[in-house]
Image (tube, rainbow, N blue to C red):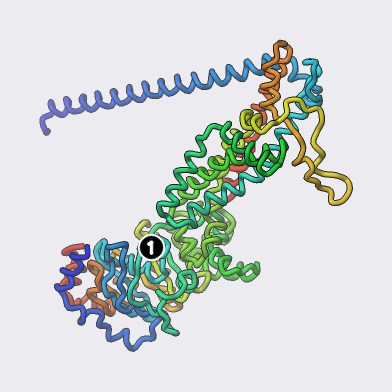
Amino acid sequence: MNDAIRTESDAFDPAQTAEAPAAHVLPLRAEVRGLNFWYGEVQALNAVDLPVPDCKVTSLIGPSGCGKSTLLRCFNRMHDLYPGNRYGGEILLYPEQRNLIELDPGLVRLRIGMVFQKPNPFPKSIYENVVAGLRVRGIQNKSVLELRVEQALRGAALWDEVKDRLHDSAYSLSGGQQQRLCIARALAPHPELLLLDEPTSALDPIATARIEDLLTELRDTVTIVIVTHNMQQAARISDFTAYMHLGRLVEYGLTEEVFTAPKQQMTNDYITGRFG
Amino acid sequence: MSDPQSQITEQSQLTRIVTANRRTDVVMAGIGILVLAAATIMLAGVMIDLVSSGWARLGHADFYTNFPSRHPEKAGILSSMVGTSLVMLVTAVIAIPLGVAAGLYLEEYAAKNWLTDLIEINVSNLAGVPSIIYGLLALGLFVYGLDLGETVLTAGLTLALLILPVIIVATREAVRGIPSDLREAAYGLGADKWQAVRMYVLPAARPGILTGVIVGLARAIGEAAPVITIGALTFIAFLPPAPVQSEWPFINFEWLNSPFTVMPIQLFNWVSRPQAAFHVNAAATGVVLMGMTLAMNALAIFIRLRLRRVPR
């Protein structure tokens, strides 16, 4: 794995990757600088640089095993849950530009929300699922909770479907509704950054379309980083796209540029379906 | 392939495979029913035998309200029933929190290394240690070492020790069985370890933990050997002091230091008498003991169903 990454690195010049003229002028929400990551002895990320512009959708694409999910999970320190993982480099959190890899993982997760590949609601009521993040923050006031539940469910375009059965089990919802519930759960505490790890890969096309619409609406208020293996999805919903391969960031730029005029041959091959 | 003749042969071959498969299913189901029937008949046989032998005494109210006696027709199980209840109370109060906490610690908090592996193997082994060994340990530690005497407290502690490994192992298994995506969801919201455990892991693991608790308590309620070893009396014609009283502070723990007997000992005592009339008492005691175990199981099932009815 290590050797493969090194060999691959010769194929392209890292210096000309991550060139994003537009991103430099935009205010940032976070910035990845020279990030390395190891699962035990296996290096999964190699010197990744990636700006995350504020209130924009940034998508990470690339073939399976390229490290896009690994990178995403670095943002809220999910890797800390499992022994043997190691980070190097920095992910700066704006505006104060603190390296979140040196912060307490709990603090990082309080600021950064995450939605996972498979809908994973808690075995509790719809209401309890949405307030879970608020309860973690010690918010007890009932009227505050109720207000935030409605806000979050409206934000996740689920309110009209569940407003009459907030106290039913979350498991009574369909897969697509469960995933929107998970988005509502992540939105309720007003995260500074919302991470989505292939949020539609377990859903049918109609549910997928609803989630995509939702993300398009959310981008005005929340900064989103989304991992997707669906290139059309990345093209449809994101402002910026990063293409990753074997633990390296190959190309980054405005989505339409990456998809219409990729600078790297490898990106071109991937988005035209020649491999991946 | 396109030849109609060969298609027909192929179809008849498929039909034969399906028929054979169906035959295997029928045979396996038949064997299953036979095995199940054998087990059920034996269990039912024991129950029917016990109930019919003990019937003469089971129907009498004084069997439940009398102390043991030299006269079999007057002898009752009051003191042993109360003794069993109190001992089980002590056992449950000590073993459940300790066992669940230990299991949670080992699974959620402890670092995964050779030491925790070693502890896990040993805990599993402890679950299989003969109960009389626990009796010997308790005799040395609680009765002589800590000078607690032959009391309800000692018996409760002994049985708690006996079932602790069962509860620890069950808790670990239940907690381990919780899918990691549930855990990641909780941590992803910024929950700390205790919040994740208390709000999400523990509730999801509750059915499994409960099963372990009941298996443990059901084992403890039927144990005679360790309780005899620590010196429980076989003839008790008085009750321990009541745990509640009318004057302040309304609650008293004197009963913990009271001598006691439990139903398995009473049963053993009666069944070893030469007079046949005492054997009736023994059978009746057996029925009550089984009834108590079944009642505990029923309670567990009830709790589990209630927990499931709320969102799941």
Which residue is pictured at 62% across the width and 17% down the height?
B48
Q: Is residue B55 above or below residue A217?
A: above
Q: Quadrant of the N terminus of chain B?
A: top left
Q: Position of residue B7 (x, y in %)?
A: 16, 29
Q: Residue at x 50, y 67 (%)?
A: B190
Where residue B125 appears, as percent x and y from the top left, is 47, 39
Residue B189 x %, y % = 49, 66
Considering every residue shown, the one lying at the far right of the view is: B247
Q: Specify whether residue A241 is in view.
A: yes
Q: Mark 1: give few (<14), some (14-19) or many (20+) Cα within 10 Å.
A: many
Image point (80%, 46%), residue name: B252
Mark 1 belongs to which subunit?
A: A
The residue at 56%/21% (across/down) is B43
- B211 and A121: which one is in front? B211
What is the secondary structure assignment of the residue under circle 1?
A: loop
Q: Is residue A181 visible?
A: no
Q: Measuring from the top left, give residue B135's x and y in whole percent.
A: 61, 34
Q: Which residue is mark 1?
A: A199
